[in-house]
Amino acid sequence: MPKKKVRPTREKPGHRPGESLRVLISDARLHRRIRQLAREIRRDFPKDELHLIGVLKGSVFFLADLARELGGEVSFDFIGVSSYGSGTDSTGEVRLTKDLDVSIDSRTVIIVEDILDTGLTLKYLLHVFEERKPKHLRTIVLLDKVERRIADVKADYTGFPIPNEFVVGYGLDFDQRYRNLPTVCILQFSSKKKTKSQ
Ligand code: IMP
């Protein structure tokens, strides 16, 4: 029988005409940093059961990798919020689209976000969760666009401060595409491709 050809899956990002990608953070750097962050968190909470709350959908790979680097007891849940339309600019509005499945009362909770941009999403989530009386409430973000901040909010743990560029990959999307890239890339538009937010 002829041997089946196996196509490499990590080779092509599948970008469209008018869009180009430049790697900002390699997968090796991502994983090194996530290991360090996990150690920091465990140092701060050596005995606690950590309850991670991933903000859908951008945080899924980050949460999955972080959870596997954290020793000890770990559980997780997800919350859905919408703040972006179909373009690259925020609408400025935050809305809950999916609530938690289990209570966070008296638990050590860590909100896991992909990127801190204006800070409006994280500020909103902190407000929502503080009212639910967790034992501790902390935040971790993989990327921080410091320049773009509007809300007065700071993450307790930060992976990488980044410049004011639109990034995709490792969970982050543009119009739901590029989430599956293993690296964080800057997305550039060579034509009038960039669309306005809804
Ligand atoms: P914030 O409320 O403005 O801080 O925005 C947070 C959310 O906006 C993130 O969870 C992302 O979903 C989205 N976002 C902000 N900047 C980017 C980006 O560069 N690429 C992809 N999504 C982004």
Image: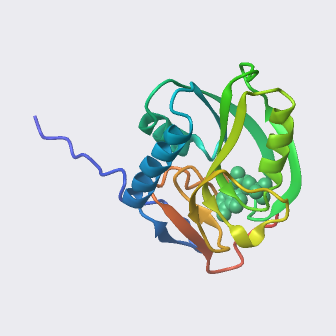
Q: Quadrant of the N terminus?
A: top left
Which corner quadrant of the figure contains ligand 1? bottom right
Relative to residue 70, is residue 182 depicted above or below?
below
The residue drawn where x is 84% and y is 59% is 152
The picture quadrant where one finds residue 142 is bottom right
Residue 85: tell me if it is visible: no
Identify the residue at the far left of this view: 1
Residue 112 x/y as whole percent: 63, 43
As rendered, which of 171 and 121 lies closer to the eye?
A: 121
Q: Position of residue 178 (x, y in %)?
A: 55, 55
Above or below residue 55? Residue 85 is below
Rendered image quadrant of residue 137? top right
Q: Is residue 15 left or right of residue 58?
A: left
Residue closest to the eye, 63 or 42: 42
Please name the residue shown 89% across and 52% down the image: 93
Looking at the image, residue 128 sits to the left or right of residue 78; the answer is right
Camera-side residue: 11 or 156?
156
Q: Position of residue 124 (x, y in %)?
A: 85, 45
Instruction: Point out the image quarter for the C terminus.
Output: bottom right
Q: Is residue 85 left or right of residue 8?
A: right
